[in-house]
Amino acid sequence: MKPAVHFQGQRIEPDVFHAQWQRAALALCQLGVKEGDVVALMVRNSPLALALTLAARWIGAYWCPINWHFKTEEVQHILADSGASVLIADEPILAGLEGLKVEGVAVYAAHGDRADKGRNAVESAHTTRFPGWETFCNGLAPAAVPQSPQRGAMFYTSGTTGRPKGIRRAPSTPEQVAAGLAVMRHCMGFNAAQYPQIRALVSAPMYHSAPNSYAIGASLENAELFIEARFDAEDTLRLIAEHRITHAYLVPTMYVRMLRLPEEVKARYNIRSIRFVGSTGSPCPPDVKRQMIAWWGPVIHESYGSSELGYMTRLDSPEALLKPGSAGKALPGVSIAILGDDGQPLPAGQAGLIYAHHSAVADFTYNGNDAARRAMEIDGKKTMGDIGYIDEDGFLFIVDRSADMVISGGVNIYPAEIEAALQMMPGVADCAVFGVPDEEFGEALACAVQAAPGAKLDAAAVQAFLKTRLASYKVPQHVNFHAELPREDTGKIFKRKLREPYWVGKSRRI
């Protein structure tokens, strides 16, 4: 793996970066990390983050990226639950983890090469008691490090409905490794024969599975890889124009922010070098996708998947225009079934729980919670709790998550349907619909709305708009407005944070 890595306007030559991640692999071995051990990483997007990921992958260790927004208690849980023997974290991040207990964990502070490394940096005894990672690495004499069978990442679920669960995957067979790479190339466009000079951009946080695997995939193709510390709408256009970017990983929220740029700003940059944009994380509203295709051309590709099950479908731009709202067709090696409450397959067009199996993805369990893993499987297929249907042409449509479904007066209501309708209302930038307690019906519908800049909306207008499009029982009784909806970095809305105020003082949570 010899990618050229670009960061903060600097280019790290392929041989130089190869030596860097190989030295990191050697350093992990010196710390006693063996095949199957866990290395926790709390490093912001940077060449160092990628080097550590490739190093752990090379020696057959699990790399466990930790969300750098997490607080001490959350990090403490992941270190204990994962059994990590090493934690490498940016020094400013370590400074904020007051009271972190690290018995049995070798902790190193990474100073790195980040432009904003001084931002929020805190000089404290907490950080100075940890040795520096770069100093340790650079003090080692170069030596070859043998490759071990690939284990994979140990990602922790987002935790929007409880404590994060760690995904521990079984070792991949050589056949699964090869098939997995083929899926990555298919979903993210890393096809050297079709695109011989790949110049790939990733700005989504690499503690999430998709951008993490995207950076690995680009490295395996020896691409020119541009890593950004964070996403910026106009800067993304500038990078594409200036460096002739051909590939990018973007999520729907990023599309929306770029589309909102003034027309004169969008016209300033030539983005015609783009050949393939891969998108995952959350469903892309059909209107947003139509606008992106009209602007960028037929280069937008969407995949449906999860950290547990991998990529399951793909949808290209022509298919998106033909089947608006679809998540695409099953990938080669993937079998998908829609099952009813009785576990039996449902006919085309009828919504039920989505179950899938991917032959290229090694099996997994949840650390310390194998019962949760077993509960999600029927006949070899597993569900992430998503509800959807497959149409007569084999295209998958995702209706909602079972965890988000609201049962009001015994009637099942899917918030995603209401959200899709409301996103078409002029002046609505985004929205979230969820259930809140109701003495009469058990649950009632509430809606949180983020208005577009300058828009003047009120609850009555929102309800009147929905009444013309949906049955009355699907119109939220409670409508409130937010300057910004709480989100993860991938754009997913934290519905738990929106629900919580309604449940204060209640003895039940559903």
Image (cartoon, helix red, strand yellow):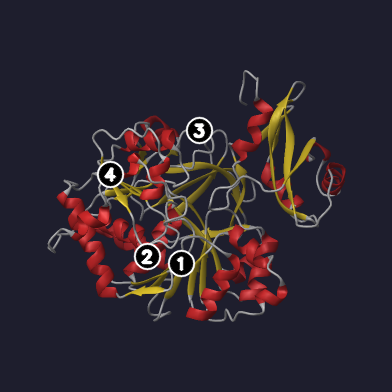
| Disc 2 residue type (three-letter) | Gly
Please, which residue is most extreme toward the top here? 507
The residue tagged 3 is 162
* Relative to 194, 179 lies left or right: left
Which labelled disc corresponds to residue 188?
1
Is label 1 in contact with label 2 (beta carbons under 8 Å)?
yes
Contact between marks 4 and 2 (CB within 8 A): the answer is no
Query: Tag on residue 260?
Result: none
At label 3, the amino acid type is: Gly
Identified at 41% across, 77% down, the residue is 198
| Residue 340 position (above or below residue 181) | above
From the image, tell me which residue sits under label 2: 217
Q: Considering the image in quadrants, where does the N terminus appear?
A: bottom left
Task: State the residue in front, 391 or 212.
Answer: 212
Of mark 1 and mark 2, the one earlier in the sequence is 1
**Three-letter amino acid code of the residue under disc 4:** Phe
Q: Position of residue 199 (x, y in %)?
A: 43, 76
Density class for disc 2 (Cα within 10 Å; few <14, some 14-19, many ≥20) is some
Could you say where residue 280 lies in the image, as x and y percent from the top left? 52, 57
Given contact means CB atoms under 8 Å apart, are the residues at marks 4 and 3 in contact?
Answer: no
Task: Kindly identify the residue that appears in the image at 37 percent across and 34 percent down.
Answer: 76
Tell me the SS state at disc 1.
helix
